[in-house]
């Protein structure tokens, strides 16, 4: 079957109102092949895949499956064709087991033989190298286990054309490796696999061919063997991009924030931060690395006065003024004392900004207390919003457009713009470029560097170690709520940081890494 | 299996979200919905009763605003409904589902009646009215703040909590009626101070319900400004949109919940004061008359805009009064007009779908 395309798209177009999401796209994937679809946010990757899986219907164009033209009006039409899509947001019933979720909605005999189902699941798992417990409930599962259930669900239904939408966005590096191994097994078994992503290194590591989209248009397909990061970036962005992150040397770094021995416990009584101590200097960028959920969020929120601490002390050294202890103060009290602390949280539209509100109202989240006794001041936030739009080149129809309607990069520009507008002494950012395209990412790096040059102490929580190593001056590594090390980002290696990230875990993999070092 | 799918046609129609809908277009869609509703209602009337629908409509208008007195009664009731709707608006803006307007109105009314009965002769007229108003607000605040305290402290479900408080309020009124019944054995309170009219709302500019109208419209206008332009209004909006954002902004979420429910409950209590002092001059457990619930419809139909609420409250009261009229005039069951109101609401609410989405039909393709 190698010569027949599993899926072929011819001149597919899709419009939403005036927006052209896909414009005359031609694409094909063969059986026994992994095709990566690469493109920036909003380039139409997900829309295109949704048309193959029947969620949208194309305005124009033809779809061929195994050489035959088909009409896919709903996911119900896609299943019999062997097309299965694994979405970014899982569609599973929490209180049911893996096996129950997998057979949910399938027709079959009146009496359900769940052990037979489990056996078949185990066979599939064994065949491709999955790790799955059919009787485990979904709510007890980690994100990666849930993803496995989604994939097995598709295979169980006989899917042989699998589409995965940004499958690695929620996975740790180790889980990503395991997923890729499974996908390779499935490819070798003759399945066609389409993976949507904007991470270049994953594309190069996994795929056989890469199709690139740019602003809803099809740019081209290249063999992965012939592709380089520079080539793919150019195709994806539409122009040559300088991929080096600037890192000026710190000028007169001075102590700005000293965190001494802080411990936090969450609502469920789990220790999220365990006697963490460190110093942040003005004029440098301190990176914070760690596997997701190692206490990064709690660390920033504790400093910002949003999470209560069990014990420990946080001291703030204002430029040219005596030290002030800020531990135990709430966010309001901190800002009332005139302490210039800015915070770009991880959850941009759920915490930093309000999606349905316009830019002016979102500027006011920080400034609404100013103004008279009763009236909120609306004039200066409007000026600030207009300033941010022109300064950071935010693509928006105007200040009164709801922020939630903007693209991810523009949302982040609005948030970062507001936070740096208060001329902070400390700037904390969590995952500042998550989900952003390359151009927006570099804008954010530039803004962080500008703040650093102004003498601001920048704390940057990140997930991409390559970026942290290129951008930061020092990197603090968290593991299970403990500070396992602070390294010089100019000399440290990725392996060194990776090892600190899994410091307390004693997995077989660690032993291997240790022996390699020895 | 693929064969089955092969040759299947494009779906007949599909629904897409509108990017934006101009004000004029939205107004036209709404107008069309009302017109369509009236046509459907006419059809239903003819089918069920064989009456001339034009006559029925005329009778509705006559019943609601046909005479000076009828117009003022309709206005009086619309104003009471409007005040309750305005009262629950800040809570809904905070996404605090206050379905306890009914109970808050009742306790406000009970406090009003208590002051009226016990201090009726003791205070000069204007002071008595102020005392009654303050007592009603205080009672409403207490009734509103209790669920807010539990919500703020233990994150209890406010919908259930406020709903249950309604039943307690009803029982409280029944309990008080035992003490205040007049004449004895009637199990009703009867008119309070029918001879001295102490505590009865006086006329304004010769208009019997002038004060109510002025007070409520002023409160509605104030609420509009309060929610849109004041600092506290912003706090309410942030808490309603996202508790995390509110915390991030340094807002004390608990304080805002309690303060907002105090405002909401207090204004509901004041509605109780108007109902006793201006409208009924007595108290019974049926005094609130479902306004606490109808007000929710009014508030959401108006998208929490207090000026729109004036029109919606009037429209609903108008239909209600018209209903009574056609019931007596054509010997119909009162439910007949509820059907008409229901059909109109169905179309008015349903047209929002066409304002937010549009339906595209399959285009003919040249093969």
Image (tube, rainbow, N blue to C red):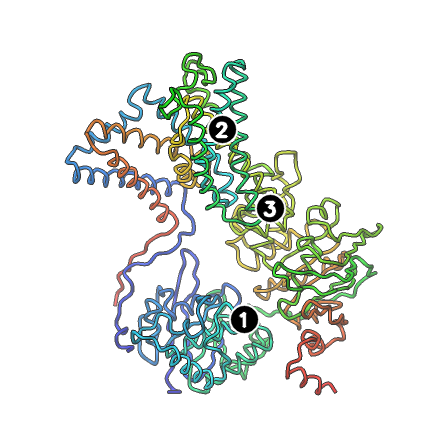
Q: Are marks 2 and 1 on the same chain?
A: no
Query: Could you tell me which secondary element the residue under label 3 belongs to?
Result: helix
The foreground one among B290 and B225 is B290
Disc 1 crowd, CA 10 A, few/some/many (<14, 14-19, 20+): few
Residue A332 is situated, as x and y percent measured from the top left of the image, at 69, 46
Label 3 marks a residue whose chain is B
The foreground one among A197 and A426 is A426
Look at mark 3 in the image and give the residue it sits on: B253
Q: CA distance from mark 3 to mark 2?
A: 26 Å
Disc 2 crowd, CA 10 A, few/some/many (<14, 14-19, 20+): many
When asked about the image quadrant of residue B54, the answer is top left
Q: Residue at x 30, y 20 (%)?
A: B67
The foreground one among B153 and B114 is B114
Label 2 marks a residue whose chain is B
Look at mark 2 in the image and give the residue it sits on: B270
Left or right: residue A381 compared with residue A219: right
Query: Could you tell me which secondary element the residue under label 1 belongs to?
Result: loop
**In which quadrant will I find the C terminus of chain A?**
bottom right
Position of B77 relative to A67 (above/below): above
Q: CA distance from mark 2 to mark 1?
A: 53 Å
Disc 3 crowd, CA 10 A, few/some/many (<14, 14-19, 20+): some
Query: Could you tell me which secondary element the residue under label 2 belongs to?
Result: helix
Residue A476 is situated, as x and y percent measured from the top left of the image, at 73, 68
Q: CA distance from mark 3 to mark 1?
A: 31 Å
Label 1 marks a residue whose chain is A
Q: Are marks 3 and 1 on the same chain?
A: no
Q: Residue at x 16, y 36 (%)?
A: B49
Going from N to C along the chain, the mark reached first, 3 or 2, is 3
Residue B220 visible in rendering = no
Residue B170 is situated, as x and y percent measured from the top left of the image, at 42, 35
Residues under numbered marks 2 and 1 in contact, where contact means CB atoms less than 8 Å apart:
no
Circle number at residue A142? 1
């Amino acid at each position: 079957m190698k010569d027949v395309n599993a899926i072929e798209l011819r001149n597919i177009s899709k419009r939403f109102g005036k927006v052209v999401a896909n414009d005359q796209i031609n694409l094909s994937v063969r059986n026994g092949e992994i095709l990566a679809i690469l493109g920036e946010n909003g380039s139409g990757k997900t829309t295109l895949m949704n048309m193959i899986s029947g969620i949208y219907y194309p305005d124009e164009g033809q779809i061929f499956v195994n050489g035959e033209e088909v009409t896919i009006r709903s996911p119900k039409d896609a299943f019999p064709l062997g097309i299965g899509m694994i979405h970014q947001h899982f569609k599973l019933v929490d209180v049911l087991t893996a096996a129950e979720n997998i057979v949910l909605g399938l027709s079959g005999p009146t009496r359900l033989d769940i052990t037979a189902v489990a056996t078949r699941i185990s066979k599939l798992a064994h065949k491709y190298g999955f790790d799955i417990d059919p009787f485990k409930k979904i709510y007890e599962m980690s994100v990666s286990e849930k993803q496995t259930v989604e994939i097995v669900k598709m295979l169980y239904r006989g899917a042989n054309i699998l589409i995965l939408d940004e499958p690695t966005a929620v996975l740790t590096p180790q889980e990503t490796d395991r997923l890729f191994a499974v996908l390779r097994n499935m490819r070798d078994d003759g399945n066609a696999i389409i993976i949507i992503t904007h991470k270049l290194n994953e594309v190069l590591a996994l795929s056989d061919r890469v199709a690139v989209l740019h602003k809803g248009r099809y740019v081209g397909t290249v063999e992965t063997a012939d592709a380089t990061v520079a080539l793919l970036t150019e195709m994806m962005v539409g122009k040559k991009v300088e991929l080096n992150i600037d890192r000026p040397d710190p000028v007169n770094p001075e102590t700005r924030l000293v965190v001494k021995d802080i411990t936090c416990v969450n609502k469920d009584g789990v220790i999220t931060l365990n006697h963490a101590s460190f110093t942040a200097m003005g004029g440098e960028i301190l990176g914070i690395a760690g596997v997701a959920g190692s206490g990064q969020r709690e660390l920033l929120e504790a400093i910002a006065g949003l999470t209560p601490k069990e014990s420990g002390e946080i001291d703030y050294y204002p430029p040219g003024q005596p030290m002030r202890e800020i531990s135990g103060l709430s966010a309001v009290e901190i800002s009332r004392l005139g302490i210039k602390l800015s915070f770009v949280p991880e959850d941009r539209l759920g915490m930093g900004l309000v999606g349905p509100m316009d830019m002016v109202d979102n500027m006011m989240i920080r400034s609404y207390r100013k103004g008279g006794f009763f009236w909120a001041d609306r004039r200066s936030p409007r000026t600030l919003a207009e300033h941010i739009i022109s300064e950071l080149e935010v693509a928006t129809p105007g200040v009164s457009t709801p922020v939630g309607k903007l693209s991810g990069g523009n949302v982040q520009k609005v948030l970062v713009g507001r936070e740096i507008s208060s001329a902070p002494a400390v700037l904390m950012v969590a995952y500042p470029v998550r989900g952003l395209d390359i151009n927006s990412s570099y804008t954010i790096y530039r803004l962080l560097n500008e703040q650093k040059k102004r003498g601001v102490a920048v704390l940057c929580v990140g997930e991409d170690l390559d970026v942290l190593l290129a951008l930061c001056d020092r990197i603090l590594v968290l593991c299970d709520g403990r500070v396992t090390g602070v390294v010089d980002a100019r000399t440290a290696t990725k392996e060194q940081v990776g090892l600190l990230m899994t410091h307390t875990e004693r997995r077989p993999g660690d032993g291997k890494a240790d022996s390699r070092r020895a | 299996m693929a064969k089955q799918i092969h040759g299947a046609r494009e779906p007949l129609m599909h629904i897409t979200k509108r990017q934006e809908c101009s004000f004029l277009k939205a107004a036209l869609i709404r107008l069309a919905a009302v017109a369509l509703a009236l046509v459907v209602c006419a059809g239903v009337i003819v089918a069920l009763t064989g009456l001339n629908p034009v006559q029925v409509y005329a009778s509705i208008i006559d019943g609601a605003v046909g005479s000076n007195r009828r117009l003022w009664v309709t206005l009086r009731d619309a104003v009471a409904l409007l005040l309750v709707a305005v009262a629950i608006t800040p809570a809904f803006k905070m996404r605090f589902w206050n379905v306890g307007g009914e109970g808050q109105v009742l306790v406000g009314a009970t406090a009003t009646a208590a002051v009226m009965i016990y201090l009726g002769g003791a205070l000069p007229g204007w002071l008595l009215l102020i005392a009654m108003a303050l007592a009603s607000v205080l009672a409403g605040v207490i009734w509103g703040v209790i669920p807010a305290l539990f919500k703020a402290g233990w994150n209890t479900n406010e919908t259930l909590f406020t709903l249950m408080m309604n039943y307690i309020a009803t029982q409280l009124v029944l309990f008080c009626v035992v003490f205040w019944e007049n004449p004895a054995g009637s199990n009703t309170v009867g008119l309070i101070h029918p001879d001295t009219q102490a505590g009865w709302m006086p006329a304004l500019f010769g208009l019997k319900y002038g004060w109510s109208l002025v007070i409520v419209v002023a409160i509605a206008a104030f609420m509009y400004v309060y929610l849109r332009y004041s600092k506290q209004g912003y706090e309410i909006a942030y808490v309603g949109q996202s508790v995390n954002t509110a915390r991030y902004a340094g807002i004390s979420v608990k304080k805002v919940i309690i303060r907002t429910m105090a405002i909401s409950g207090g204004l509901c209590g004041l509605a109780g004061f108007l109902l006793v002092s201006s409208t009924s001059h007595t108290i019974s457990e049926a005094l609130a008359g479902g306004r606490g619930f109808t007000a929710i419809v009014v508030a959401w139909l108006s998208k929490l805009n207090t000026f729109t609420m004036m029109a919606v409250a009037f429209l609903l009261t108008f239909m209600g009064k018209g209903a009574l009229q056609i019931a007596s005039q054509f010997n119909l069951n009162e439910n007949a007009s509820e059907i008409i109101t229901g059909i109109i609401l169905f179309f008015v609410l349903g047209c929002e779908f066409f304002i937010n989405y549009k339906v595209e039909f399959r285009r003919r393709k040249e093969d």
